Image (cartoon, rainbow, N blue to C red):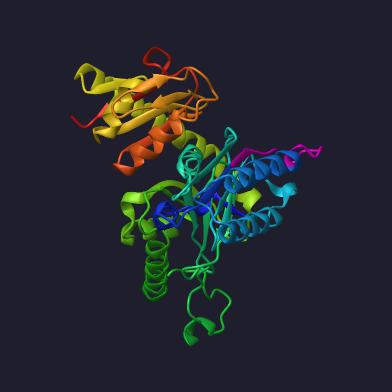
């Protein structure tokens, strides 16, 4: 099973690519640490629905039906229901399957098409505010990927990164050896941090998530001076020995600074919205924003955390959902707004409920 913090622009592009029909997407709410078998029942029922739809589809021949059904079974068998999150997304074709865990609760859906359903995945990913944490230490630097309060260490791109073996002069005896800085030792530290920065640059390539730093003051100072990722660097937490912390311990160290960073980001975004309103360069409400996002005019999209709305999407406008049984109805048009906005290069930020009450729960700063 994969988690949204693993999502990258390259992975998303691959998931969005057309596939031979049928490409099956199964989306369902799940419940972490559930004590009953409700998730197993929901999973069994949604699989039965998908297989019935495939068996009745004239575009799916007998051989294809057998192959896709087998892949669906493989995907189901790979799910550990004791480790699910608030939502589970199965993406299945005749030649592959992927199972993604979502940090937000989705509406149940079965989609059979020539592309995968990715809007819930993208929206959940953005909602969880993905970020990186680089723990800097002279002995070992570690890279973590975070969404919400979940951290996972990255063991790729050269991480964890350790310096090369010490120069023989570092082993010279002496009671006070190593207690005083020297130009030689500082230059070696600079070289090591440059190497760490090269590895970080490769790891975060193609994304926009902020990078938070943890380490001793002098190490953070040197890294700030030489990093090529300066525009991505955000929170700095001064803490020694962080390279030895577990994910849970590291989150506790970071949490106050991360919460303050998120609050400041929301404040700045609302200030931008206020300026845009004064300049008549904004849109408010799902229907008005639907048209502007289709035109690629949205620069910043603001959405309340738990806002959901059903609608029938049209070329330029949304129509109210007359019946939830209507196949044209999208249970949560907000997910599509988010995915479309991101696809046009817009920023997306989720804010606390009722923040946008006077703007229809969703608002946008427009490019023009």
- Quadrant hosting residue 320: top left
Res. 271 in view:
no
Question: What's drawn in magenta, residue-wise?
Answer: 27-39
Residue 65 versus residue 27 in the image, above or below: below
- The answer to whether 1 appears left or right of 263 in the picture is right
Does the magenta-highlighted stretch encompass residue 37?
yes
The C terminus: image quadrant: top left
In depth, the one of 225 and 347 nearer the eye is: 347
Dominant SS of magenta comes to loop
Where is residue 64 shown, x and y percent of the image? 56, 59
In depth, the one of 115 and 207 nearer the eye is: 115
Where is residue 189 shown, x and y percent of the image? 42, 70
Q: Residue at x 64, y 41 (%)?
A: 49
Residue 315 versus residue 220 in the image, above or below: above
Res. 237 in view:
yes
Does the magenta-highlighted stretch encompass residue 168?
no
Where is residue 325 shown, x and y percent of the image? 55, 25
The N terminus: image quadrant: bottom right
- The answer to whether 222 appears left or right of 238 in the picture is left
Q: Residue at x 49, y 87 (%)?
A: 168
């Amino acid at each position: 099973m994969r988690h949204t913090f693993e999502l990258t622009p390259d992975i998303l592009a691959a998931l969005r690519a057309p596939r031979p029909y049928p490409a099956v997407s199964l989306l369902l709410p799940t419940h972490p640490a559930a004590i009953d078998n409700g998730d197993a029942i929901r999973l069994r029922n949604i699989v039965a629905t998908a297989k019935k739809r495939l068996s009745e589809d004239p575009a799916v021949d007998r051989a294809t039906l057998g192959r896709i059904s087998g892949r669906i079974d493989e995907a189901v068998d790979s799910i550990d229901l004791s480790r699910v999150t608030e939502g589970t997304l199965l993406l299945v074709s005749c030649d592959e399957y992927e199972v993604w865990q979502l940090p937000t609760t989705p509406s149940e859906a079965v989609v059979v098409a020539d592309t995968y359903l990715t809007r819930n995945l993208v929206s959940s990913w953005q909602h969880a505010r993905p970020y990186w944490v680089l723990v800097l230490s002279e002995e070992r630097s570690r890279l973590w990927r975070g969404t919400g309060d979940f951290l996972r260490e990255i063991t790729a791109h050269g991480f964890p990164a350790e310096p090369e073996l010490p120069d023989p002069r570092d082993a010279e005896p002496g009671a006070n050896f190593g207690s005083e800085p020297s130009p030689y030792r500082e230059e070696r530290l600079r070289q090591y941090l440059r190497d760490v920065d090269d590895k970080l640059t490769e790891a975060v390539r193609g994304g926009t998530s902020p990078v938070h730093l943890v380490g001793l003051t002098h190490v953070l100072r040197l890294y700030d001076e030489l990093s090529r990722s300066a525009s991505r660097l955000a929170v700095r937490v001064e803490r020694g020995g962080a390279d030895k912390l577990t994910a849970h311990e590291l989150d506790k160290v970071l949490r106050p600074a991360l919460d303050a960073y998120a609050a400041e980001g929301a404040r700045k975004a609302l200030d931008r919205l206020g300026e845009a309103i004064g300049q008549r360069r904004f849109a408010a409400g799902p229907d008005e924003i639907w048209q502007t996002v289709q035109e690629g005019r949205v620069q910043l999209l603001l959405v309340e955390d738990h806002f959901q709305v059903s609608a029938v999407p049209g070329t330029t406008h949304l129509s109210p959902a007359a019946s939830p049984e209507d196949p044209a109805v999208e249970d949560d048009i907000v997910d599509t707004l988010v995915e479309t906005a991101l696809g046009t290069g817009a920023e997306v930020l989720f804010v606390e409920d009722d923040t946008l009450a006077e703007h229809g729960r969703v608002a946008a700063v427009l490019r023009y």
